[in-house]
Amino acid sequence: MQGAPTSLDNSHRRGVLSLPFDLLICIFALIAEDWLSSYKRSKLDPLVEALSKVCRAFRNAVLHTVSLWTKIDERYCLRDDFMDLMARSRSAPLHIDVSLSKSDWEQILSRVVPYRDRWQELTIRSCQSRLEDVMRAFPDVEFSCLKRISVEFGIDEVDHDKFFVQWKFPGLDMLELNDAVPPLSCLPVLREFHLLIVDLDTDDKAEALLGKLMDFLDCTRTLEALHLDATGIDTTVPEHLRVVELPNIKELVISNFEHTSSNSHDWFVPPAMSRFIRSIRVPNVQEYRLYLRIEGENEVIPEWIASFASSPDVLHSATYLFVSSDFSFDNATTVEFFALLPNLRELIVDVPAFGENLLYSDIQLNLERLRSLSLTRETKEYLQIGPRLILNQLSANPRNFAVELDPDLYGYPSD
């Protein structure tokens, strides 16, 4: 094709990486020589022929885009095409995903560690004994280009301080850990931190981790994005958890919902969650996302709302809310809750948390900045959308307002 690109730029590369794998297979199959030769040219549909030419140009561009061959996944087995991937990726930065729980971990590392000067993103899945073996086998290794690292092992399984001292990451930009906080001295340029609290099943463990987290946050001066998934705490948050103010934080995500475990019930008690949220102040935040799952008895809800109302500025900056509950808030509680969220721009409600109130009551909610509302649940009656809230928001924000119902999520008809 005339003018067809010989490789993909960054924006097109991201688009290709987001395509479903099955679709890529179809694209490549459509331009296969044996497929085209099985038809006589005179009988080939013009549209199919044109599509095959587009796909051929696409295929050629993909094959010459080195950054599409830089994601190396060694989690399940040793890749036979490893050296081929290295050849195709040339000198581009690498994204490495390795599992060190397998018996062939030494062979895996012996192949990937020599390319450590090109590592840009690393995911490690391991356990205590194996990681200690790894650090003995590869002592004092420096990863000069590494920007993002995700380490999946728990606080009882490994000495994180030892890990970050022995393996050096001078340019680290993003870090994700399970049940652990890194030593601040090892991370001078960290911009983004993700903490996934997976399994802290005693008061002592919870208090120790949260105390260390607050110390870390209180000292950092480079952090701009903080993601906290607190699903795994099986106890309440300490009453005396101190407040930290983070003026440099531009993005905050707090969740007790996305990684729900079957035995994590006490953490969902609303007062505990509100104490945790109230302990983190972000006066200059630009994106503040909350994912809340509320469980417990109805009588704890007023206490939960009151705990937020006692510090009304805590949720003032929240821009996104996903809230789910197995029981419905009454009208007064609904009004009081949303009054704490004046800057909310996007709302996803898993009814019945507020469903009946949003759809059928006469309550007035002043969410002047809301631009997107989504309702999800398997109850078909919620699809009868004549809610006063929607009408109020449409009249207040006549442009750029989206309403979404999600019937297909649970497999019921949308008509």
Image (cartoon, rainbow, N blue to C red):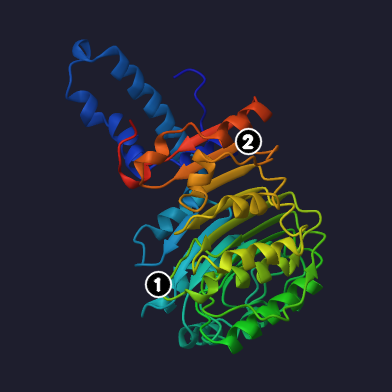
**Residue 49 occupies which quadrant of the picture?**
top left
Coordinates of residue 261 in the picture (x, y in percent): 43, 70
In the picture as drawn, the residue positioned furthest to the top comes out as: 42
- Give the residue pinned by disc 1: 262
- Residue 138 vs 227, above or below: the answer is below
C-alpha distance separating marks 2 and 1: 34 Å
**Residue 104 falls left or right of residue 320:** left
Question: The disc labelled 1 sits on which kind of residue?
Answer: Ser
- Give the residue pinned by disc 2: 371
**Residue 150 occupies which quadrant of the picture?**
bottom right
**Residue 82 falls left or right of residue 238:** left
- Identify which residue is drawn at 47% across, 88% down: 129
Question: The disc labelled 2 sits on which kind of residue?
Answer: Arg
Coordinates of residue 368 in the picture (x, y in percent): 70, 37
Q: Quadrant of the C terminus?
A: top left
- Residue 261 vs 28, above or below: the answer is below
Task: Using the image, tell me which numbered label, if any, was put on residue 407.
Answer: none
For mark 2, give the secondary structure: loop
For mark 1, give the secondary structure: loop
Q: Are marks 2 and 1 in contact (CB under 8 Å)?
A: no
Coordinates of residue 57 in the picture (x, y in percent): 42, 27
- Residue 343 vs 191, above or below: the answer is above
Coordinates of residue 97 in the picture (x, y in percent): 47, 64
- Residue 73 vs 109, above or below: the answer is above
Can I make out residue 337 in this image? yes
